[in-house]
Image (cartoon, rainbow, N blue to C red):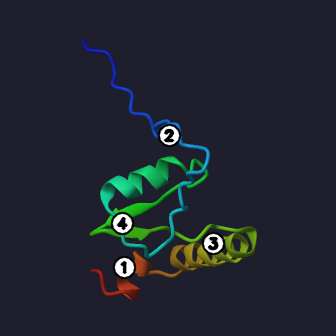
Amino acid sequence: MSSPTIHPTRLPVAELAPSETIPPLRHGERLTRAEFERRYHAMPHINKAELLDGVVYMPSPVSRPHGTPHFNLISWMGYFAFSTPGVEEATMVLFGWT
């Protein structure tokens, strides 16, 4: 039996010269993979960022003013689907994914 492999989520950032700063990641920027990884590892507070075809994608941060109405809407939709015969997979049907 082999031991489990550990995958770190963040690698340490190499020592920088005092005058060198790493610019932050910005949604929509075009970067190389090496530059994306350098910036990503320098920003430990970023929970998720992706580089797809050279373009940086970052989701908007979730906040309480967004979270409360979202929770209420999802709760209402769940209650509606539960209480209405014949309703299932409401999101898939709404967007034609069936």
- The residue depicted at 63 percent of the width and 72 percent of the height is 75
Q: CA distance from mark 3 to mark 4?
A: 40 Å
Q: Up-down: is 2 above or below 93?
A: above
Q: Circle 4 is placed at which residue position?
A: 31
N-term mark: 4 or 2: 2
Looking at the image, how many numbered discs can be counted on the residues? 4
Determine crowd level at label 1: few under 14, some 14-19, many 20+ residues with C-alpha closer than 10 A: few
N-term mark: 4 or 1: 4
N-term mark: 2 or 3: 2
Q: Find the residue positioned furthest to the top.
A: 1
Q: CA distance from mark 4 to mark 1?
A: 34 Å
Q: Position of residue 33 (x, y in %)?
A: 31, 57
**Secondary structure under badge 2?**
loop
Q: Up-down: is 70 above or below 39?
A: below
Q: Up-down: is 42 above or below 23?
A: above
- Asked whether, in this view, residue 98 is left or right of residue 88, the answer is left
Q: Circle 1 is placed at which residue position?
A: 92
* 45, 59: nearer the viewer: 45
Q: CA distance from mark 2 to mark 1?
A: 42 Å
Labels 2 & 1 near each other (Cβ < 8 A): no
- The part of the image, by quadrant, that contains residue 30 is bottom left
**Secondary structure under badge 1?**
helix
Q: Circle 3 is placed at which residue position?
A: 75
Q: Position of residue 79 (x, y in %)?
A: 60, 74
Q: CA distance from mark 4 to mark 2?
A: 18 Å
* 87, 51: nearer the viewer: 51
